[in-house]
Amino acid sequence: MKIGTVIALLVVVAGGFYSFARFANSGSNKEKSAGGEVAGDIKGGGTPDKAVGDAERFRVPLEGPGRGPATAKVNIVAFSDFQCPFCSRVVPTMEKLQKEYPNDVRLFFRHNPLPFHPDAPLASEAALEAEAQGKFWEMHDKLFANQQNIKRPDLDKYAGELGLDMGKFKTALDNSAHKNRIDADMKLATSIGVQGTPNFFINGRQVVGAQPYEEFKKVVDDEIAKADKLLAAGTPSNQLYAKFMAGAKTAPSPAANAPSQAPKGPGAGAEVYKVAVGDAPTKGAKQPKVTIVEFSEFQCPYCGRVSPTLESVLKDYGNDVQLAFRHNPLPFHNNAMIASQAAEAAREQGKFWQMHDKLFANQAALDRPNLEKYAQEIGLDMGKFKSALDSEKYKDRIKKDMDDAANFGARGTPNFFINGRNFRGAQPLEAFKSVIDEELKKADEKLKSGTPRGQLYAALTSNGLAKAAPPPPPPPRQGEPDATTVFKAEVKGAPIKGAKDALVTIVQYSDYQCPFCSRVEPTITKVMDEYKGKVRVAWRDLPLPFHPNALPAAIAARAAGEQGKFWEMHDKIFANQQVMDRPTYEKYAQELGLNMGKFKAALDAQKGKAEIEADAASGNKIGARGTPAFFINGKFLSGAQPFEAFKAKIDTELKTAEALVAKGTPKAKVYDVIMKDAKGEVPAAPAGQAPEAEKTPDQDQTVYKVEAGDSQAKGPKNAPITMVIFSDFQCPFCARVEPTLAQIEKEYGGKVRQVWKNYPLPFHNNAEPAAEAAMAAGAQGKFWEMHDKLFANNTALDRPNLEKYAQDLGLNMAKFKADLDSSKYKSVIESETKEGQAVGVNGTPAVFINGRKISGAYPFDMFKKITDEELAKKTGGGHGKVVAKRKT
């Protein structure tokens, strides 16, 4: 699994930063410090002035690049990471603070690149060299504005744009000239308990995460008031910070990091939304003071993880809390929708919560046969249950939940609304309790004022927002079209749905295998429903090179289109993105009543391939280089945006089109008139600056020097093919690729040797213990048997389960436990991880086939293609470029 993908999941859990949030308020929160020079002498501790108050502070010297007046009343030290999305998100907040408090706030930057952001350390070195040449903040702004593009060529480009001395810049990066400075910042961060980014110290008081502007403002205002008291008492302005630091801590107290102290989590937002419970299944209090509406799905591991927390909430709060469950199955979880339907079918028979518990207990087994098994186990009428699933009886109801989730900004799972306040992710119990306790106080006030208990939820949310504000559009990337310019998005020859004389034309560039393209399809359906007769959609194919099934799917849709059923085939393919192969397309064709001879012939001849390639070329010309991409009357909209983003653009374009009609343009000619002066292409990136297109594994001929060593292996030592597998037992994508590796082993027999290398990812808490268990089993001759057990149960990898699997395999339990207790194989695992890093592994799974790398859980065909190519080389074929290990 690629690191970026995992981080996308962590975002849901952490809610705005890579750690749990703590606010800097009165004395109950832990603040931390850093070393260096400050305005005024802060050495030697001392007794804090009463004017400073009792807020907990940490001694954080003002070192590193700073901006703002030297006499500022408030000094903010930020520990940050250029690849962290939350650090990027908070940059405008810091700018706003400095704009609002031009004479009172000064900002310092310290480096804390996180271990799972591979490009962050080099980006920090680039910023430090820019600092050495007097342009730190200019480089800082460049890096955050281009966070997706911070590899070495990009850094060189930005340095050139800033007019840096390129010889000095390149030499500094080549020699890691600033590494010691970064290491010092990181060491400092660790010593004061900084556990993620961004982390801020405001006059020594800690605020963690990309918190809203109001949270920072609250602390800043409080600090200014304290500074004013100190100034009034005669403290010189250049000694203010020293006053704040007097008596400040130099390290967190042991209790701050004690295992017994529960993490708090980021909590809930202040805004209240009017989220209906409706007919959702509920449990807990009948007339609650606090209502929790949960948007969740059964295949999401984070939803599973938070389920025991919710049980604790209901147990601890008894008659005061009610939980309502609403469905939000995510499109990239192939069994989530049918699992939701199974839960609703069980609900029809009065057993929703029993099925709910079964599904979460068996998240890795949610296919149709298992759903029927669970239904039988909880005593459902099987005829009725199967009929509900066959007819998709509850699909519309689930989609209504999904629409509401999107409306209120709940685009990931789990998402909660606690008395209408949005609370994101699988946060710890203490975080739930903190918000619930706040809401209980509000409910008690309402009860005192005469609100009946049964009407509390309605009263507390009566003034709530009816929908969430749309997220801000992402900034345009290099070579991406400007959103206000009209581009020539042709519709000739494209499949079109909607009125011929519609005033707004949406040209959609899409890819059948892209999960974001699937995610946006319901939004497009909603657009067509809401703007009936006013909007039409033209389809253009843009199959991405790393989606191997996208082109065959596009050919199948076009083949159906030849027989008048393009949109029907389009809908079928998107409805089941997990199964995209020739037999499935033929099955859909049969269901649609197509002429099968004609359909098969079109697929055999790859008919329409030239037109698909022409679509892709036309899209690239006007800036559609990723999917989905839309041109709304020629104006660009990128990605799977919410309905509100489409609505805003459509409403604007409708006004423009209506003005043309009012001046005499026939409705059917409006689009032609708009296209007449449209731009034909996006300006190309400057020479040498265009990013290199990403290669698929079969296109990449690079050969890495990967040694098998004495790692666990199966297959003949002299096999012509060696597959070195860097993997993680807790990674779902590693589990997904295992059947592919087994199929390779079966089909190629003695021609393939498979070598296992441990690469436990740092955010998979059970991955390393599982790896140690596998190695301990290997010491008793049962590595591969344990390997299979772990992947078959990769959501249950805690110590008791590891011991259970060892017992199932007949291992010597005393020896097994002793090996785990002593971390006997920890150094071996660390060594294998370093081997992976040395050859560019930064996520799992990563498989090297005779040195050629496949990163990710690609389909069997990709593995087969590269294996066949490498076998051919053994009988006299070519060779790729060999790359030695990277420096670590």
Image (tube, rainbow, N blue to C red):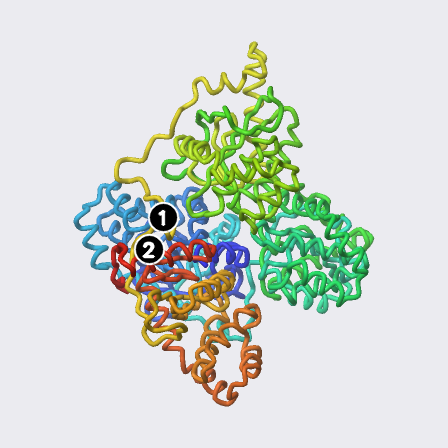
Residue type at mark 2: give it: Asn
Gap between marks 2 and 1, in whole Å? 56 Å
Q: Residues within 10 Å of mark 2 (few under 14, many from 20)?
A: some
Badge 1 is on which residue? 695
Taking 641 as reference, is 847 above or below it? below
Taking 259 as reference, is 298 above or below it? above
Residue 204 location, quadrant: bottom left
Taking 807 as reference, is 55 above or below it? above
Q: Nearer the viewer, residue 50 or 139?
A: 139
Which residue occupies 67% across, 54% down?
338
Residue type at mark 1: give it: Lys
Answer with left or right where residue 174 lies relative to residue 363: left
Sequence order check: which comes first, mark 2 or mark 1?
2
Q: Residues within 10 Å of mark 1 (few under 14, many from 20)?
A: few
Q: Indicate which label's residue lies in the foreground, 2 or 1.
A: 1
Q: Nearer the viewer, residue 130 or 308?
A: 308
Q: Position of residue 880 (x, y in %)?
A: 27, 55
Task: Report the number of discs.
Answer: 2
The answer to whether any part of residue 202 appears in the image is: no
Evaluate if marks 2 and 1 touch, with contact meaning CB atoms under 8 Å apart. no
Which residue occupies 59% across, 16% down?
667
Under circle 1, the secondary element is: loop
Q: Position of residue 388 (x, y in %)?
A: 76, 52
Badge 2 is on which residue? 238
- Which label number is shown at residue 450? none
